[in-house]
Image (cartoon, helix red, strand yellow):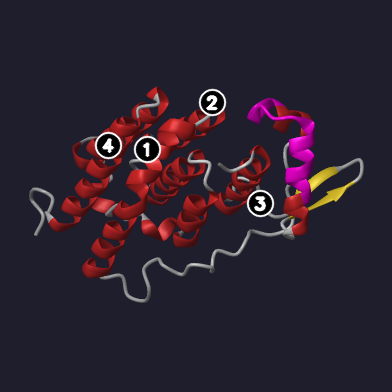
Amino acid sequence: MTSRTQRLVDTLTARIREGVVRPGERLPTESSLVETYGVSRTVVREAISRLQAAGLVETHHGRGTFVLARPSTTRFPAGPQGEVTLEEVTGLLEFRTAFEVEAAALAARRRTDAHLADLREALDAFAGAAEHPSTAVNADYRFHLRVALATGNHHFADLISSLGPSMIVVPRERLDPGGRFAGIVAEHEHIYAAIARGDADAARAAARVHLANSRARLLQPEPGDG
């Protein structure tokens, strides 16, 4: 299993990828990271050293550690390429199902309280963004990325990071507080609840249902469409 240091590195790298901490901004203090993630100062210092070695942050004595740039996500150029067709998007959903279902199960076994707090934040942001498509997409993406982080296996997070927010497809006309959007939120809630309970089988099933429903929503028109 991934070490505590590597998990913290993965989490902070994800924060940079998500734009939570932008280039030029300061990372939380050492004491804050210790308290938030329940790790020792030694773990925090080693994680910061690894981020420095990767060229992601720079530490200034007496001022703190600052983000230099977002990490490249070109190691696995899998997201939609060129024109985004229905075939391309459904193919991507099939690909996501192959690894996100198991990621949810692993997250249920390995998640920490900090992981749950991060998942809750992303889910709440998604639920409240029905009238703001770009915000909804970014929050949805953060939720799936944070499930991957909760596995404790950085390969899941690396893969989702390489796909980027373009892996999320929520048609603008489906973003209404009721109707299909409410159902999409409920599907995410089921994934979260299973992970929170530590129920790997339920998390696996909830993730599979969500991704299968996502595919069905793309293929079945909204009542009154067309």
Side (left or right) of 64 relative to 193: right
Mark 4–mark 2 Cα distance, whole angstroms, equals: 20 Å
Residue hosting label 4: 206
Q: Where is residue 219 in the image (x, y as percent from the top left)?
A: 14, 57
Mark 3–mark 4 Cα distance, whole angstroms, equals: 33 Å
Using the image, determine if residue 214 lies above or below residue 37: below
The residue positioned 13% from the left and 50% from the top of the image is: 222
Query: Which quadrant holds residue 43?
Result: top right
Looking at the rendering, the stretch of residues picked out in magenta corresponds to: 35-49
Between discs 3 and 2, the one toward the N terminus: 3
Q: What amino acid is found at the position of numbered circle 3 in the picture? A: Arg
Residue hosting label 2: 113
Between discs 4 and 1, the one toward the N terminus: 1
Give yes or no for contact between labels 3 and 4 (Cβ–Cβ under 8 Å): no
Q: Main secondary structure of the magenta part?
A: helix
Point out which mark residue 105 bears: 1
Mark 3–mark 1 Cα distance, whole angstroms, equals: 31 Å
